[in-house]
Image (tube, helix red, strand yellow):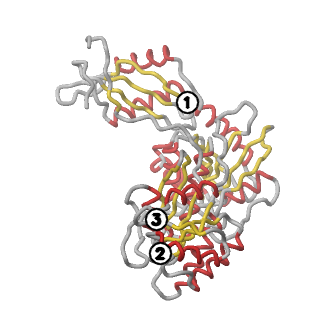
Amino acid sequence: MSEHEIETVDVVEDAPGDAGPAPVVAVVGRPNVGKSTLVNRILGRREAVVEDVPGVTRDRVAYDASWSGRRFTVVDTGGWLPDSSGLAAAIAEQARLAVELADVVLFVVDATVGATDVDEAVVEILRRSGKPVVLVANKVDDMAAEADAAVLWSLGIGEPHPVSALHGRGSGDLLDAVLEALPKEAPPETFGEADGPRRVALLGRPNVGKSSLLNRLAGEQRAVVDEVAGTTRDPVDELIELGGRTWRFIDTAGIRRRHKENQGADFYATLRTRSALERAEVAVVLVDAGQPLAEQDLRIISMVVDAGRALVVAYNKWDVLDEERRLYLEREIDRQLHHARWAPRVNISARTGRHVEKLVPAIETALEGWGTRVPTSKLNQFFADLVSSHPHPVRGGKQPRVLFATQAGVRPPRFVLFTTGFLEEGYRRFIERRLREEFGFPGTPLDITMKIRDKRGRGRR
């Protein structure tokens, strides 16, 4: 390799393109019927906790899976079970949640035991729901046990699929049945269609006013509004005319700070909220201006930044603030939102409609920044001036330099820096700050990655 050739090594890989939200498959059943073993079999790896004790699933319960090229999310509901008292009621509640918020329910029955009273109670819930249900007859380890599986036709929810989650017998046929039951795959999301409505996700803590804002924007009562936190559990899409154009608003369930063992509706709601964010182009994060900024607010904003979506921060209930609270809020914003100072800010009241009309210009500004592209010639002139006037500090006798840069993409803007060494985080933050000062990028995160070469021309590993 000549000294002029550059061999590179990726420090941070570009994020994969948006593939859209994955449908949710919930695995439901009594304790110790093999739900977690089945989840591991579907994943093709051991991730779910498996132990011969009822109800041991306690930690992470959602997993990314795929079969025949189709992605979906598997949710192991085993961790929602309490102690043995009230077990039937607990499983029934688990089934209700799965029915309400999953796309397909995998109902697992131990074929060697047969259908119990608890199983039949769950079947009633599943049958009334109308949701797709795939009946799994587990622990069918050989041909002799298939007769046990056939008896489960009596449950009246369709064909029992005999499998051995432990040994893998019948798992391929089961997954084919799951794919058949999944909703038809949505067409790929295309950002910025010429005539299509831009997609806006409403995010925020429970009871912060998202549904009230959606109703205010729509001019009528569309979403359920209740004083009980977390009333909205599923995203609701609304086409709304604002500022002379149509927008698609996605009202999402509130994100709580923590979920006790990732249980129940709140866990599913967070899963759905992430899917809604995947579908959106810009997120409006509502914050209760009357309360101190909480860890939940900062985590939601971080979710938007990590997802690479445009961002607008709307401070709701502004009409009830006194001067002292407004002063404190300004200090909180300056201190705690330093990583998102670039986000347009709007002070509104969803209840009275005050300044709600300012949302559209803020959203348009964020989307414009999100799609901004800098010509390569301007970008490299900018970096030449930057490196000349503010070189990277010398570390260990070495001073890494930016050789050249290119903008690899937009939505969000992605930059690749070709360097002679690793750039410290502080210097990368400095580069981002100067990029914003020079080219704007309001309302959008920036993705800055490096490709490094050693001075000897060899890619560093």
Three-letter code for the amino acid on which mark 2 is drawn:
Val
In this rendering, which labeled residue sits more in front, label 3 or label 1?
3
Q: Left or right: 155 with respect to 305?
A: right
Residue drawn at (47%, 65%), measured in percent from left and top?
258
> Does residue 434 show up?
yes
> Does residue 287 show up?
no
Q: Label 2 belongs to which residue?
A: 33
- Quarter holding residue 40: bottom left
Q: Label 1 belongs to which residue?
A: 410
Rounded to the nearest angstrom, the CA distance separating label 2 from label 1 is 48 Å
Residue drawn at (47%, 58%), measured in percent from left and top?
42
Q: Residues within 10 Å of mark 1 (few under 14, many from 20)?
A: some
Image position of 307 with respect to 44: above or below: above
SS class, disc 3? helix
Specify the quadrant that holds the N terminus.
top left
Q: Residues within 10 Å of mark 2 (few under 14, many from 20)?
A: many
* Mark drawn on residue 38: 3
